[in-house]
Image (spheres, rainbow, N blue to C red):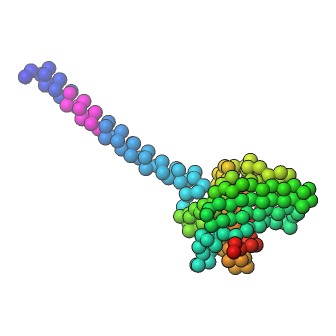
Amino acid sequence: MDNTEVRYFSFMKKTEVLNMYQKYLLILLVLLLCSCLPMEKLQNDGYHTQKEWRCDPLPNAFEETDLVGTWQANPNGSASIDKLVVREDHKYKQEFINNNTGYKFESGWNEWWIEEKISGGKYIHFEGMQNCIFKETCSLPQEKDFFDYCENSWVTMEKEFVLAIVGDSQALRGFRLRHMRPVGWESFFVNYYLVEVES
């Protein structure tokens, strides 16, 4: 084998080694990117980010059936009354009345379901729930970003409302349903209290 052949094979060997290192670097880069994606998702996901629960805990004896009954919000003592009639079969309907204007709204039966967060907090999803509070008429939520005090985070909602189930020793059954604050509101204290138990 002459010097030219030696140099050729030496060059090919170096090329193979270089290609091998490039493949390893590419695999390593892909693995690093994949490991970062879940963290980015967690940082941007208002529901599944691991956070601390800041609201009062629920009673130890809490069960899903404790949600069955009629829940009522009367924000800031206003003339408006918003009711949620919750059934055990995971159906609910919304009833709203503005005693000043006489405006009334009643929905059909929609779905509700419970979500439990990593923080230990529980939330109830009311699919199709209308935004009637501080509005002339009821409508699906126009705002999409809501501040959740219980987990100190912003949550995106669409075509539903999600209420935090928080402990309250003064409330019937020891808990209430806390509404989240819409973007642009400095203060928004709306809670639903159980006023009628299904017999």
Is 62 rendered above or below residue 12?
below
Comparing 103 with 117, the one in front is 103
Quarter containing the C terminus: bottom right
Residue 132 coordinates in the image, percent (x, y): 79, 55
Q: Is residue 136 magenta?
A: no
**Is residue 83 left or right of 36 when viewed as pictured?**
right
At x 31% / y 41%, what residue is drawn?
A: 24
What is the span of residues highlighted in magenta in the rendered image?
12-21
**Is residue 132 left or right of 31 when viewed as pictured?**
right
At x 34% / y 41%, what residue is drawn?
A: 27
Q: Is residue 20 magenta?
A: yes
Residue 22 coordinates in the image, percent (x, y): 32, 36
Comparing 49 with 103, the one in front is 103
Residue 50 coordinates in the image, percent (x, y): 54, 61
The quadrant in which residue 99 appears is bottom right
Residue 168 coordinates in the image, percent (x, y): 69, 76
Total tally of numbered discs in the picture? 0
